Image (spheres, helix red, strand yellow):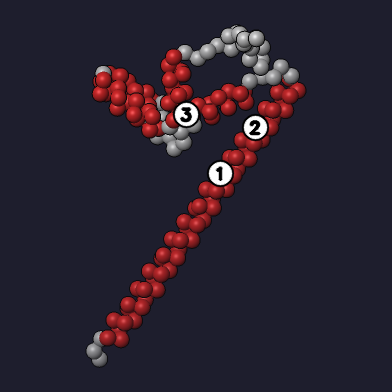
Amino acid sequence: MTTATATSTAPIGLPMTRPGFFARCENWLDERGKGAWIGAMVLGFIFFWPVGLALLAYMIWSKRMFKKSHNCSSRRSNRHAMMATSGNSAFDAYKADTLRRLEEEQTNFESFLTRLRDAKDKAEFDQFMDDRATKAALSKDDDAANEPA
């Protein structure tokens, strides 16, 4: 029976190191979402208030309090995997060009969505103003018709 050694190698040939205790705790909390972070902070305040305060400060500093998504660690590890070199310079150049192009397309799409939302907001506002003007004109006509002659 064979056993895996602790010194396996990463894809680029460097030895992999196991993340430290705090990094493992951070990843574990990230996998469980913002609620886990808040729970850990509350427990920190209950058992030893400086721990809760330190967690609160870290959550604010790292912007974990304000993120909408909870899988921060998977995005961070995916980003790291995308930036790792393969050892083949032609492939790395192709990958960098493709990632640049995809980021540019994402930026263009996000700006398109922003323009689309702005156009929708403007159309809704224009409709509101038209309805308001129509109601004002109708009420003015009703006031003129109800006045004694």
Residue that appears at 50% across and 26% down:
73
In the rendered view, tell whether residue 66 sits above or below residue 53.
below
What element does badge 3 sit on? helix
In depth, the one of 13 and 137 nearer the eye is 13
Q: Residue at x 45, y 63 (%)?
A: 126
Task: Name above or below for residue 141 compared with residue 59.
Answer: below
Residue type pointed to by label 2: Arg
Residue farthest along the bottom direction in this orientation: 149
* Residue 149, picture quadrant: bottom left
Disc 2 target residue: 100
Query: In this figure, which residue is indicated by the disc labeled 1?
Result: 110
Image coordinates of residue 79 in percent, x first then y, are: 57, 26
The amino acid beneath tag 3 is Glu
- Residue 78: x, y in percent? 58, 27
Q: How many marks?
A: 3
Q: Kindly report the distance in space between the C-alpha atoms of the residues bearing marks 1 and 3.
A: 27 Å
Residue drawn at x 31%, y 82% is: 142
Tell me the kind of residue under disc 1. Answer: Glu
